[in-house]
Amino acid sequence: MSSSFIEIKGLTKWYKQATEPAVNNLDLKIEKGSVFGLLGPNGAGKTTTISIICNQIKANSGKVIIAGNDLSTDTEKIKKIIGVVPQDIALYTNLTACENLKFFGNMYGLSGKFLKQRIVACMVNFGLENKLDQKINTYSGGMKRRVNLIAGLLHQPEILILDEPTVGIDVQSKMVIIEHLSKMSKTEGTTIIYTSHLMEEAEHFCTQIGIIDEGKLIVTGNPAAMIKEYKTCEKLEDIYLLLTGRSLRD
């Protein structure tokens, strides 16, 4: 039986001088071991929601409960079980992959033999075992994206937060990333929160999705079940456009 591993209640965030809240009384439940796609147009509140969960910014009101811990009072406990992979490549390009990963591993409290073994194992998993001692500035875009991901999962987090993890990379790198993340979810019980504008990828990768717009949750559910429910829609992208509209969001 699945449990509500992350629960968001009445989450609201106003930015200074904004005329509307970025997140508006948002309620959301995410089950343990699920791949949850947080989807929505530009400015819908996805990044703000993720930033609050990661404790990078504070909400004006509402609660975030993660693994039974309240984000407002149990921050340090929660930090230890979360891994964050930003959309921008957060690597030192003049250092090797190994040097980068040692640095990030140390930040998560890893060291010594265990850290070395984790680095090698992760590089093997992502097909980069022969590139360990090459500088990041010699890597292709897909290779950088994979090392960026490894940096966020070295400490084996219970929750992995991914912001556009496959944007702008080749099909082969995308396949390796998605396959490994799916395996982590199924075999290790890792809970994944994922944002993307790639609806086809989200439809096949996510076990649950939530579509938000104007800071509010519009719908949540399993992608396949949702496609059956919306009789006029053949794919997730059709549902997304039906619910968020076709007007441009710049």
Image: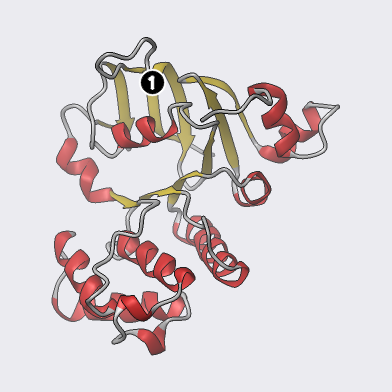
- Locate residue 209, reporting x and y percent: 58, 36
Dividing the picture into quarters, in which one does residue 244 lie?
Answer: top right
What coloring was used for the rendering? secondary structure
Q: Say left or right for 242 vs 4.
A: right
The quarter of the image holding the N terminus is: top right
Tell me if residue 219 comes above or below residue 133 in the rendering. above
Looking at the rendered structure, the kind of residue marked 1 is: Ala
Tell me if residue 153 comes above or below residue 127 in the rendering. above
Q: Nearer the viewer, residue 76 or 201?
A: 201
- Locate residue 184, reporting x and y percent: 47, 61
Dividing the picture into quarters, in which one does residue 114 lie?
Answer: bottom left
Number of dots carrying numbers: 1
Label 1 element class? loop
- Disc 1 crowd, CA 10 A, few/some/many (<14, 14-19, 20+): many
Which residue lies most toward the bottom here?
130
The residue sitting at 17% across, 34% down in the picture is: 74
The residue sitting at 38% across, 25% down in the picture is: 8
Tell me if residue 83 comes above or below residue 65 in the rendering. below
Dividing the picture into quarters, in which one does residue 73 lie?
Answer: top left
The residue sitting at 39% across, 62% down in the picture is: 149
The residue sitting at 39% across, 28% down in the picture is: 7
Q: Which residue is mark 1?
A: 22
Which residue lies most toward the top here?
19
Which residue lies most toward the right here?
232
Q: Nearer the viewer, residue 245 or 234?
A: 245
- Locate residue 105, reporting x and y percent: 21, 67
- Locate residue 218, reporting x and y percent: 58, 20
Q: Say left or right for 110 vs 139.
A: left
Q: Nearer the viewer, residue 190 or 249?
A: 249
